[in-house]
Image (cartoon, helix red, strand yellow):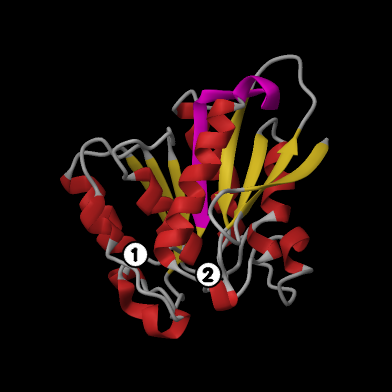
Amino acid sequence: MKIKNITLMQPYSSLDIYQSKTDRPLPGIVIVPGGSYNQIMERDSERVAVTMATHAWQSFVVRYPVVEHKNYENAKIAISEAFDYIVDHAEELQVDPKRLGIIGFSAGGQLAAAYSNIKETKAKFAALGYPVIQPTIDERMGVTTENVAELVTKQTPPTFMWGSIKDDLTPFVDHVQVYANALAHHDVPFELHEFGTGGHGIALANKYTGIVNGDRVDEHMGKWFPLFLDWLNELHLA
């Protein structure tokens, strides 16, 4: 695997590229980590990228502005620039743009949803893990966001979502359910798994992410990942 980082035009932003050697173009996934704009969480970034690579995906991690540079609108620009770079360099990166999607966690889930809904999106699917949907925790994060459920249209790409009913940071009724209702209203294909165990910020919920996440492991909630891979296969995107 070749790992490199390229600087994006948006200040304080870059793209980590995890490029696997291959004899044919592979599907690609752009990962948008969480961290409440105070950090880029390793549990949601590097470890997800490496895991996706083991399933024959070209993986990319967007490092958007955080801490003193945090800004929701600038983060969205960074994601758009990342997709433009990947598509423009698809042959070099050995990625199939027709099977290129986005996955976001927590605050990164809100950013992923926002990008998937822009008119010129290059994402063929979106996956949202315990996402922020409404601006209910803006004050806590120190940013001004939006209700991304209001952005959903009939052109929104197929979407996979998961969370935990025990999540007290982005409760189901205020976030996941709101977005699911918007997808259903616009007849957008989607799949939703709301687990009875786990919680917020649990990433892959296995030992690989647990060792950088306070030993937080939940085998039941961790089933979101194989379900996600099955969903991608059903859509012929894997």
Residue stretch rendered in magenta on the structure: 90-104
The percent position of residue 167, horizontal first and vertical second, equals 46, 75
Looking at the image, can residue 228 be seen? no
Q: Residue at x 60, y 57 (%)?
A: 13
Badge 2 density bin: few <14, some 14–19, many ≥20, Cα 10 Å: some
Q: Residue furthest bottom?
A: 140
User: Pointer 1: what residue?
Assistant: 133
Q: Residue furthest left?
A: 185
Q: Name which residue type carries label 2.
A: Thr
The quadrant holding residue 89 is top right
Q: Residue at x 30, y 58 (%)?
A: 148
Q: Residue at x 24, y 52 (%)?
A: 151
Tell me the quarter of the image containing the N terminus.
Answer: top right
SS majority, magenta: strand
Of the pair 7 and 27, the residue shown nearer to us: 7
State left or right for residue 38 relative to residue 144.
right
Magenta region includes residue 188 = no
Q: Which mark is nearer the camera, 2 or 1? A: 1
The image's mark for residue 33 is none
The percent position of residue 98, horizontal first and vertical second, equals 48, 23
205 versus 62 height, above or below: below
The quadrant holding residue 20 is top right
Q: Residue at x 74, y 74 (%)?
A: 215
User: Pointer 2: what residue?
Assistant: 197
Q: Residue furthest right?
A: 1
State left or right for residue 206 relative to residue 63.
right
